[in-house]
Image (cartoon, rainbow, N blue to C red):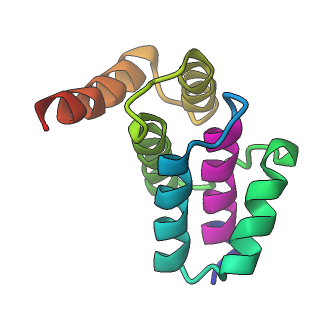
Amino acid sequence: MLDIDLEHFRNLVSLAAVDGKIEDIERVTLSKIAFERGIPLDRLNIMLDRAHEYLYLIPQNQVEKEKQLEDMIKLALVDGDFAPAEHKLIKTVGEKLGFSKQELDSLVEKHVRRINVK
């Protein structure tokens, strides 16, 4: 596994925990992502236990930045509740990644519409 994949996943774990709890659906989603990326179950469990300790690590290229932000939005919406803490973190991350407010709002709206359509 590449370090960048692990950093990306760690950021997702951090997002899941930002509202003070990791919901069951978030755990399931993180487990699926971990499996797809070859992250062992024991390592996933340690990361979930230490989620509140992680600092957000900024991806180094635009493709990774976009992928990371989209994954964060999807994860935030997976439990059907876009908690204010999750939205605030995504907004902060989006700004740090260089996305304009309009770009960020557009990405969030695109994913919220997908949830509402299903």
Report how many numbered discs are placed on residues in the image: 0
Q: Residue at x 69, y 69 (%)?
A: 44
Tell me where residue 6 appears, x and y as whole percent: 67, 68
In the image, 52 versus 65, the foreground residue is 52
User: Relative to 69, does residue 11 appear above or below in the rendering?
Assistant: below
| Lateral position of residue 80 relative to residue 98, left or right | left
| Lateral position of residue 44 relative to residue 102, left or right | right
In the image, 52 versus 63, the foreground residue is 52
User: Relative to 40, does residue 7 appear above or below in the rendering?
Assistant: above
Tell me where residue 103 appears, x and y as whole percent: 36, 24
Q: Residue at x 50, y 43 (%)?
A: 72
User: Relative to 31, does residue 86 appear above or below in the rendering?
Assistant: above
Is residue 91 located in the magenta-colored stretch of the structure?
no
Most distant residue in the front direction: 24
Please, what is the dominant secondary structure of the magenta stretch?
helix
In the image, 21 versus 85, the foreground residue is 21
Q: Residue at x 61, y 59 (%)?
A: 8
In the rendered image, which quarter contains the C terminus? top left
Most distant residue in the left direction: 117
In the rendered image, which quarter contains the N terminus? bottom right
* Region rendered in magenta: 5-17
Determine the image quadrant of residue 47.
Answer: bottom right
Most distant residue in the right direction: 53
Q: Residue at x 49, y 67 (%)?
A: 33
Determine the image quadrant of residue 89.
Answer: top right
Determine the image quadrant of residue 101.
Answer: top left
Tell me where residue 30 appears, x and y as whole percent: 54, 59
| Lateral position of residue 41 relative to residue 26, left or right | right
